[in-house]
Image (cartoon, helix red, strand yellow):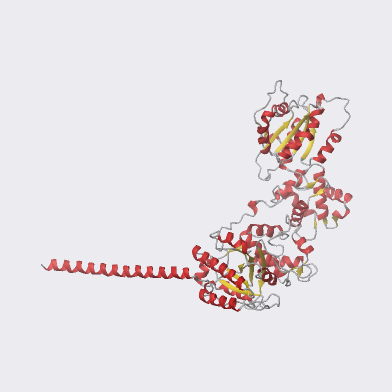
Amino acid sequence: MANSTATLNFGGRSSVRIVVIGDQGTGKSSLIVTVAAESFPDNAPPVLPPTRLPSDFYPDRVPVTIIDTSSRPENRSKLAAECKLADAVVLTYGCDQLATLDRLSTFWLPELRRLEVKVPVIVVGCKLDLRDDNQQTSLEQVMSPIMQQFREIETCIECSALKQIQVPEVFYYAQKAVLHPTAPLFDQEIQTLKPRCVRALKRIFILCDHDRDGALSDAELNDFQVRCFNAPLQPSEIVGVKKVVQEKLPEGVSERGLTLTGFLFLHALFIEKGRLETTWTVLRKFGYDNDLKLRDDLISVSFKRAPDQNVELTNEIVEFLKGTFFMFDIDGDGALRPAELDDLFSTAPASPWTEGPYMDAAEKNALGSLSLAGFLSEWALMTLLDPACSLANLIYIGYAGDPASAFHITRRRRLDRKKQQSQRNVFQCYIFGPKKAGKSALLNSFIGKPFSDRYKETTTECFAANIVDHPLETPKKTLIMREVPEDGVKDLLSNKESLATCDIAVFVYDSSDENSWRKTKDLLMDVATHGENTGFEVPCLIVPTKDDLDPSPMALQDSTRVSQDMGIEAPITVSMKLGDFNNVFHRIIKAAQHPHLSIPETEAGRNRKQYRRLVNQSLMFVSVGAAVAIVGLAAYKVYATRKSASN
């Protein structure tokens, strides 16, 4: 595999800014003048103005701007400001001044850390021609302990501006450290490719393995070479590449060609030999940025939508995901074990479901394996909350179709209410209720978790997603339940559009606790009033829980009365402990599908509607009166005209 000088997207960079720092008298200005003018200056000024190296100065054809600095204490703030704007730092010491070498680790490198300058550092020993000939210690011996302590050091080099020794190389290495950084690819400490780099290269390998036989044949290797480097491989070069791999790593080559193990070994070899540009060329040709994520322009689909519209996966993508699920279900047990799920996402930068809100949001069996329903529900949840992330991960795991055809923007909820029917396949349900009402138990039961009497307070929003199976429903509907902690309701409702994404709200209370119902009733009134005031009304249901305990007659009677007064369905009693769900999840879906039937109406809302009706009737009366007057006036004019004509 050869290097490429073709123009690439260097992580979006069109120039490189290099700041030169170091003790006074170490040769900073002379170094800069010499590289720009290709001659040593007789009298270099104390601090140079910004110096630009043109785009054709180095093979990558990216211009370089070099910033000189003063190390005087009175100029310390300006130096700090320049360092914070740097893409790379060249840190100088004098080969003839051992004290300046000591200052690297006692002052300069700690100072860069204090300033939080997180860019590659090139340590440069200037005035090589003045070094004491009796000094036997090599550069590697001197710098190795410093590089162990300060991992931000990319490389070290010695030069002489006077003798024109390795001067252009100083800024070449600095530019290279920016355009082809080591840190994202390789762990210097353990001398191995970093996990995210492995994931990216594995995806590239799979994309290039057209026949899916687990190896790159000679033809596939040649196609890969042409795609990345715009030049074919000669047969002898292919033989040479495989021979290098096989000698060091026999399993890197099989009878079918170069294996994934061999492919990864080759890239580790390139990096160890300082040929990072080769690996970066491959990564960038396949769309990766400096964080080893796909560039935004490759996954940029417009998700522009109104607040009360959501994004759903299309049927085409659901079928793609089903196929992917069964492909990675190696043991054929109808569920993805953690290892199988890790393998599925092994071509993504990281598994997207290892942290909240996805980690515990879907149905798993006793072994922690994810069912097909749970797998599809996780995708539905990710698409609802972060469609861009959903698209990126679809591409990472192998979806090669048109990104625009992967998603569907739903109809506005406001229109759903007018049409008295929702066309959605995914419904989001907000769960409200006071502490200890049973909200978490309701979510847990929805995804098959066993009931527990142990109370654990929910302090952040939690999600549970599952497919609600119904023999008459095609396609199946997915319900996403979002638990809103009691303490978070006020903040939620402070946003005018907070209910815009809600298909239905469920109000949970402990049926044995009268006080629990009172708090729930207040929450119901708050949500209903918010919906009336903002125009984002949502259907609501009341769910008394803990039906296995002695009920509070007052709470049940009052909740029934409130549901009747507000025009919503009667309370649905459940017991998570006994597993008596009273068909609650189907009923939630049904109410969400016909939103107009369960929208609560407060007394204030009724009064407003009555007032609007009276106003409309008055306007109609005025309009009719005005029309009669106009007709009468027209008749009078006709009469007057005829009378004057007869006279």
Q: Quadrant of residue 506?
A: bottom right
Q: Quadrant of residue 621?
A: bottom left
The residue that appears at 54% across and 60% down in the rendered structure is 497
**Could you tell me which quadrant the C terminus lies in?**
bottom left
- On the image, the x and y values in percent for residue 388 come to 64, 57
- Counting every numbered tag in the picture gives 0
The furthest residue to the left: 647
Taking depth in this image into account, of 362 and 175 the one nearest to the observer is: 362
Q: Is residue 570 left or right of residue 267?
A: left
Q: Is residue 223 above or below residue 344?
A: above
- Residue 505 shows up from this direction: no
- On the image, the x and y values in percent for residue 367 come to 79, 68
- On the image, the x and y values in percent for residue 214 come to 80, 59
- Residue 302 shows up from this direction: yes
Taking depth in this image into account, of 351 and 263 the one nearest to the observer is: 351
Taking depth in this image into account, of 198 and 504 the one nearest to the observer is: 504
Taking depth in this image into account, of 460 and 274 the one nearest to the observer is: 460
The furthest residue to the top: 42
Q: Is residue 292 above or below residue 376?
A: above
- On the image, the x and y values in percent for residue 524 come to 56, 69
Q: Is residue 343 above or below residue 9?
A: below
